[in-house]
Image (tube, rainbow, N blue to C red):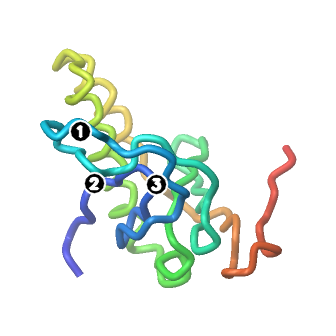
């Protein structure tokens, strides 16, 4: 394993990069660094799940990944998964043309957070019936 996962991409597993959401539209601009990647996603596919993490400030973060990666994920890898999400937020802020100060503030805030515990997996297996619906 490498020290870092690549930045999270829309509709893909944060760990392995497999598609876990139905793709409704892709980036059509051939000059974009995201050309061909999902621009709009639909429903989660049966091989996808969401992991609900408790963050160090008491907030919760939902991170999508495939069921296989979710089952193999260990507490020592939580930080690597979060770093991939922070890297994606940083890249998104750069593409959006945010000023350097705004981008640093946004990314700095995310970097100050750490996933403390995995609270729940929204789907435990490939069977759609195992989907956990949060009715808070």
The x and y percentages for residue 113 are 42, 44
Q: Is residue 114 left or right of residue 36?
A: right
Q: Residue at x 36, y 32 (%)?
A: 109
**Along the line of sight, the residue nearer the viewer: 15 or 78:** 15
Query: In this view of the protein, which residue sits in the foreground, 35 or 82?
Result: 35
On-image quarter of the N terminus: bottom left
Give the x, y percent position of residue 38: 39, 49
Question: Where on the picture, by quarter, is residue 32?
Answer: top left
Label 1, on which residue? 91
- Mark 1 lies on a secondary structure that is helix
Q: Residues within 10 Å of mark 3 (few under 14, many from 20)?
A: many
- Density class for disc 1 (Cα within 10 Å; few <14, some 14-19, many ≥20) is some
Q: Is residue 1 above or below residue 119?
A: below
Taking the spot 32% from the left edge, 51% from the top edge, the residue there is 37
**Farthest residue in the right direction?**
135
Asked if residue 103 is positioned above or below residue 67 in the image, the reply reads: above
* Mark toward the start of the polypeptide (1 vs 2): 2
Locate residue 61, reporting x and y percent: 56, 48
Give the mark toward the camera: 2 or 3: 3
In terms of secondary structure, where does tag 2 sit?
loop
Q: Which residue is mark 3?
A: 11
Mark 1 to mark 2 CA distance (whole Å) = 8 Å
Residue toward you, 33 or 7: 33
Out of 93 and 115, give the one closest to the viewer: 93
Q: Are marks 1 and 2 in contact (CB under 8 Å)?
A: yes
Label 2, on which residue? 7
Pointer 1 or 3: first along the chain: 3
Q: Where does the image place residue 66, in percent across and percent down from the top left?
A: 51, 72
Disc number lying in front (1 or 3) = 3
Specify few, some or many for label 2: CA neighbours under 10 Å numbering under 14, 14-19, or 20 or more: many
């Amino acid at each position: 394993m490498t020290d870092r996962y690549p930045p999270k991409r829309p509709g893909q597993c944060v760990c392995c990069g497999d598609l876990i959401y139905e793709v409704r539209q892709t980036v059509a601009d051939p000059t974009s660094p995201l050309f061909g990647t999902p621009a709009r996603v639909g429903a989660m596919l049966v091989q996808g799940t969401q992991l609900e993490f408790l963050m160090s400030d008491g907030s919760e973060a939902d991170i999508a990944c495939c069921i296989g990666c979710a089952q193999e994920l260990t507490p020592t890898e939580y930080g690597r998964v979060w770093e991939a999400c922070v890297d994606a937020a940083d890249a998104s802020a750069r593409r959006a043309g945010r000023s350097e100060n705004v981008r640093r503030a946004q990314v700095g805030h995310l970097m100050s957070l750490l996933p403390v515990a995995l609270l729940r997996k929204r789907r435990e297996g490939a069977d759609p019936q195992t989907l956990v619906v949060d009715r808070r």
